Amino acid sequence: MNKYARKNMKHNKRTFVKKVAAFTMLVSMTVNICACGASKDTAVKAADTVLTFAGNNISLGEVYLYADTVKEDYEKTYGSGIWDVDISVTRNKSANMEDVTRKDIIEDIVHVKLLASRANEYKVALTQEESDAVVEEAGRFYKNLTDEQISTMQLDYNMIQNVMQENAVARKVYNAIIDSAAIEVSDEDARETTFYDLYFDCYTVASSGDVTKFQDDERQAQYERALQAYNTLINPIESDVNNGTSSNNPSSTNIEGLAEYYGLYNSSYYTMTPSEIRGIYGEEIAENLYDLEDGSYSLVTESEYGYHIFFMKALTDRNATDKKKEELIVGKRRSYMETKYEKWLGETDPNYSYEKSVDFDVYAGIDF
């Protein structure tokens, strides 16, 4: 599979990993679940304590309120087998999805507690209306629990209400911080370009995966086919299609139809950022692409792997650009907040670590 054909696979994998690799604080906020610890003067660790943070014992039941919602959401989206999947966490490292999720849930709990503890600093408090909404939501949530859930995880209404109240406070603190940061992303930084690559490849791939480049005469033949296709695009033969007849010759500016006619199975529409285009096609082709206007075609363009005719659908794909902008903003907000969390963690519980502060035997009581 050549580097152009691999692009969509890489994009889909990247999108999947983005969705499943880490639960940010924003995700945990969305489900209105967080963990509230016991009183700070708790002297003895209870038998059902999963995590001790800043002198607070966080029980199995409190963590379960997070985990059960996460489990239901992910299995609904990806199926129950998701927990056996290994995902990339860095370029050269993978980890089991369940292990990654367990760690991220604890991290989110810590983040919520850090946020809630800064409520006075950011002059944040729940209004009466917000407090009433928490009470109402806690009641609905408790009624939907089964007897087995309540018994096994030692859940009660007060715990759930406290969980949701802390979550609501943390959400307001987060919003106050983000609003003051005024994080923005420009259209240029988020630009996504959509184009069609009518691609005449000049190599073969053996079953072993070995790539053999075409000889000069074979490459010349591909170039001539590309020129023929280009002439068809800029000088379409209208009669066949307009009259509803068929022919063995390409007869319209339907570039996808031309790809089918010539058997160009690696041709496709692509939506990419400028950096992705440069990475796939190189700097020179990227510059030529961005010289095109919407609705125009490139000349026959040579690359290491063959010949291309590009159709520029949208230099700035509005929908894709807006979506990319949202992703970049989320990423910038996450990075901004991570610096806050790191600082607060050092001030609040400098000895905390996931590996040392979590009782994994107790945590195993929550099944994935």
Image: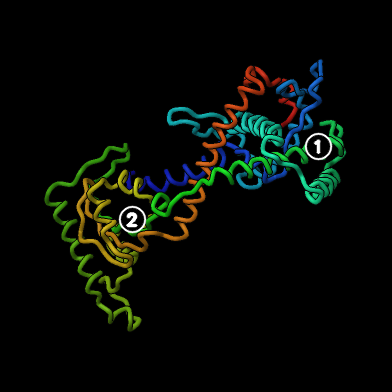
| Mark pair 1, 2: CA separation | 58 Å
Give 177 or 305, whichever is nearer the viewer. 177
**Residue 197 screen position, x and y as percent:** 31, 57
Whether 224 is drawn above or below 202: the answer is: below
Residue that appears at 42% across and 43% down: 10
The quadrant holding residue 352 is: top right
Q: Residues within 10 Å of mark 1 (few under 14, many from 20)?
A: some
Give me the disc on residue 24: none
Color scheme of the displayed model: rainbow
Work out which quarter of the rendered image holds the C terminus and state it: top right
Residue that appears at 60% across and 41% down: 177
Q: Is residue 368 visible?
A: no
> Is residue 222 shown left or right of residue 354?
left
> Is residue 359 shown left or right of residue 189?
right
Q: Amino acid at mark 2?
A: Tyr
Residue that appears at 66% across and 23% down: 348
Instruction: Count numbered badges in the picture.
Output: 2
Residue, disc 2: 265
The quadrant holding residue 343 is: top right
Q: Is residue 353 visible?
A: yes
**Residue 318 screen position, x and y as percent:** 44, 60
Work out which quarter of the rendered image holds the N terminus and state it: top left
Furthest-bottom residue in view?
243
> Is residue 70 shown left or right of residue 232?
right
**Residue 87 screen position, x and y as percent:** 52, 34
Q: Amino acid at mark 1?
A: Asn
Whether 250 is drawn above or below 81: the answer is: below
> Is residue 10 shown left or right of residue 18?
left
Mark 1 vs 2, N-terminal side: 1
Give me the disc on residue 162: 1
Q: Are marks 1 and 2 in contact (CB under 8 Å)?
A: no
